[in-house]
Amino acid sequence: MRGSLVSTGASTVTEFISQNIFGLDDPNWFMYLLCGVIAAVLVLHVIAVGALFFIWAERKIAGRIQDRLGPTRVGGKFGWLQTLADGVKLIAKEDFVPRDADAPLFKIAPYIAFAASFAAFLALPFADGAVAHQVNTAVFFVLAVLGLEVFGVILAGYASGSKWSLFGAMREAAQVVSYEVPLGMCVVIPVFVAGTMNLTTIGEMQAGWFNNWLVFHDPFTFIAAIVYFTCATASVNRAPFDLAEAESELVAGFHTEYSGLRWSFFFMAEYGSMFLVSALASILFFGGWHPPIPIDIWILEAFADPDLVAAGPLKDAVPSLVTFLVMLIGIATLVAKSVIGVVVMMWVRWTFPRLRIDQVMATCLKYCVPIAAVCFVGSMTWETLDLPSMNTINRYEVHEDWSEDLAVSTAGQDEVDPDLPEDKNYDDESSDVMDGEEAPIEEDSVAVQNGLLLQEGE
Amino acid sequence: MSDLVSQLKERFGDGIVDVNAETIDDWIEVTPDVLLDVCEFLAGDSAIKLDMLNCITAVDYLHTDPKKAAKADFDPHMQVVYHLSSIEHKHTLVLKVKVDRWKNGEEGSLPEVPSVAGIWRTADWHEREVYDLSGVLFTDHPNMKRILCPDDWVGYPLRKDYEMPLEYHGIRGR
Amino acid sequence: MSTKVDDPRVIEFDVRTDEMLINMGPQHPSTHGVLRLILRTDGEIVSEVEPHLGYLHRCAEKIGENLTPRQWVPYTDRMDYLAGMNMNLGWALVVEKLLEHDLPEKARHLRVVISEMGRIASHLVGMGAYGLDLGTFSPFLYAFREREKILDLFEKACGARLTYSYLTPGGATGDLPPGWVDECRDFLAQFKPCIPEFHELLTNNQIFISRTAGIGVMSAATAINYGCTGPVLRGSGVPYDLRFNGEERYTEMYEGYQFDVIVQDPETGKYPDPHLKEFGDDLDYPEIPKEAILGDCWHRFYVRMLEVVQAIRLVEQALDKYESASGDWGQPIKLTQKLPKGEAYLETEAPRGQMGFYLVSTGDSIPWRVRARSSCFCNLSVTSELCRGTLLADVPAIVGSLDVVMGEIDR
């Protein structure tokens, strides 16, 4: 199938399945359901296996920082099956609800927290094409859904029937909601520089050497990346901002009364969110699924059929097996970068004391928000004045796909709109994006016609 | 020590009942009536300035064995001992107050001593402990409650004639 | 949400509807032992704190009226169980004071070695647990790693790791084993470079400073009035250390040693030089942060840190003196030694403050009355005053800076 990978509404996987397995041209509702289930299962496994790995990593890292070994018994010398053993233990625990607790809310709270964390993964691209559902405003979607996790926490705190839990929940609510402001501001900066909210687009724009990463775009994005990481740590309640679960003060905060499987859901949600914000940081700032040395591009170029290269995007000129391999490399790279981010969060946790709630709020309002605002203005100025940058991202390159959808839906179901530029893609390797020149904007592209892209000279 | 004693005798006359300067730790015994005034003087006077109260102890002088009681050289009484020291002048003093074991001889009504918690805040908790364990009531105390034993405990454990209750909330005592 | 309160006296508290009565403890990760704090809070701001004690009361004083002094020594261990050696020392000195028994020189130096090593071990727990209260786990484990080595040394000396009963009236139960002095010196040599680690993780850490500086400020007058002693008193700027200012029977133990009272000089605003540079580290003396006010939690913590350094120097001097001293280690008195008629009171500088013992005897071998004056008892009484108007998260910070051990408070 030709055409951009970011196609018009339907998931490529759905099309793939419907065309190749069921022999239909257009997928019907069953295909969508099947693909939805497959995507959900895959994402669920990301969180579950991720939690498994991260809990083990946390204990090992904590042990090593504290001059001891960590788990060493279950699963060989390094104890990597420890989490599995813990999971079995947790499942086997007595399922009880405290007498003063509000039972329905108490039971549902962990699932809400987990669902929010899980839902945000749906829009997170792991590589070009490896995304559960392609959402054009993915950044907005992910941030919005991530903020819903606080509902689960508040419910847990309220429904536990214990004052300590309530305290923890209230603190967490205050913290998460306040930190969404600087978080949003830091996220808007790469969105602005890239010119799109589509995470796949942003990731693809950073293809090439590591100097193409958005973090090196200008000094303000560099600072914004650091502030983003701080705000992300605060919004997932990790130390030094973990007063919602502050052991020494509130026993265990909002999840004091939880045990067994319910408790493990909270923790899967926590590690899922940590992975998510790290992955978001990687995509927005650190090049996404592209390794620092452009091995994936080199592989694609090596296998590219020279006749097809000029006619369309590089991926289409390459056998699908190689595309798949490159996608796997991309997934591995993104996961590696996110794991590094999570490991840094763990490292910070086991080193620093905890901040008090008023100090957390002060950090947010007195430091993070102003710095993020300054970075935003600075980055905006840098971009508008077209000051020199270490990378070659140009937001005017971006093709706004939602306008394409608009054109298709108004033009009719079966016809392909002839006005649609066929291969005006963001990762147009055939054009000279990597060489630092500006690719020409098609004069009569739909976007230009709709007045969405500036023409040259305007 | 001797000039301190003479100063005190001058000011409080009969209040100073006994002085013992030959023992290892010298002590001055005062009556409960003048205790507050003596303490205020000792804590306030700049030359003496006994501004830290180290410890308040209650000692129960009672022989439960009648044979030993006959041979003893004291009558049954309760002593409240105050250990004071001065941070600035680095000297110490021991004050003693002797009271009856039961007020007016009636068993069950506690002897009373004025509280010095207004002079040294340390006395707050120390007097609560003395009340709790030895049964000496301190008048004008801000918070006269038991401190170590549970609030509904009966009896004063450190008294010599104390017997552990048979049971407490279903837990066997002896 | 539960509105039940289990304390029947709470009804008198007259709780307003916008206030919460929170029960912290007795089982709580951060109260140092079984302490129950009832907090009245308005949201996060604490308006009143009432400590409830007695969960660890084991009637040690009553038991003392049934045992001879040497038999009562293990009960002193279990009071401040983190500094057992210093508790033993206090009791031994009081009994010797009543008996008017003098020790040979070697016994005195042995006691200095042991009690100062005990001071290091106790402060390590205090500092580590304080970090734990504030949320940082790693310094706790580093402190315990060093403490384990000290406990190994103590185990070689007396056979026990926590409840030693080593220093008895008359001296000690036995001499230090051969080779102990060299092992002790090796330990000190390896411990000194670890101290800057603690400074980096805790003393100089910006988050630690913002959690402790300016919190729980106690003036010198308040400290003296409430009977606070030890690092709590010296952290408020009062230059009072029983090793200098105490009774002669105690200060003669430290005669000939070179050490300072760890307190901030009111004129220069500096603490005595801990001679960190002699430790072979270029790390300079941590500066007092500008947010720290004299009498706050940071200063109390800092006094403890410097006392550790000073204790190392004392141990070094003591080891040399011990090796060159004459006499024996101080044979313990007879188990059924008859006590003369009379009474004696002695306070010693234990790691957590001044620990006093009062011994009344009517001529028997069994005392008439035994009283232990606990340092933490008075230190804890200040909590209700310090915690008024602070945030909830400051309560463990303040209680941790007072470094209380419930065993000593409840006896």
Image (cartoon, grey):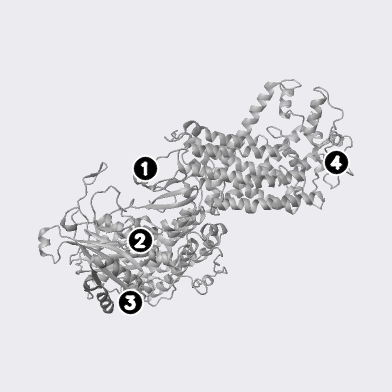
Q: Looking at the image, do the residues carrying marks 2 and 1 touch, with CB atoms under 8 Å apart?
A: no
Of tags 2 and 4, which is closer to the observer? 4
Q: Amino acid at mark 4?
A: Leu
The answer to which of A417 and B39 lies nearer the viewer is: B39
Q: Residues within 10 Å of mark 3 (few under 14, many from 20)?
A: few
Q: Is residue A418 left or right of residue B164?
A: right
Which tag, 1 or 3, sits closer to the chain's start?
1
Corner quadrant of residue B86: bottom left
Which tag, 2 or 1, sits closer to the chain's start?
1
Which chain is disc 2 placed on? C
Q: Which residue is mark 4?
A: A454
State whether residue B158 is above or below residue A122.
below
Are labels 1 and 3 on one chain? yes
Q: Which residue is mark 3?
A: C326
Of tags 1 and 4, which is closer to the observer? 1
State whether residue A429 is above or below residue C127.
above
Q: Residues within 10 Å of mark 1 (few under 14, many from 20)?
A: few
Q: Residues within 10 Å of mark 2 (few under 14, many from 20)?
A: many
Q: Which residue is mark 1?
A: C6
Which tag, 3 or 2, sits closer to the chain's start?
2
Q: Looking at the image, do the residues carrying marks 2 and 4 touch, with CB atoms under 8 Å apart?
A: no
The location of residue A337, given as percent across then percent down, is 66, 45
Q: Quadrant of the N terminus of chain A?
A: top right
Q: Is residue A234 left or right of residue A18?
A: left
Task: Judge whether residue C141 can be spotted in this image.
Answer: no
Q: Amino acid at mark 2?
A: Gly
Q: CA distance from mark 3 to mark 2?
A: 27 Å
Disc 1 element: loop
Are labels 3 and 2 on one chain? yes
The answer to which of A209 and C29 lies nearer the viewer is: C29
Q: Which residue is mark 2?
A: C84
The location of residue B158, given as percent across then percent down, is 23, 56
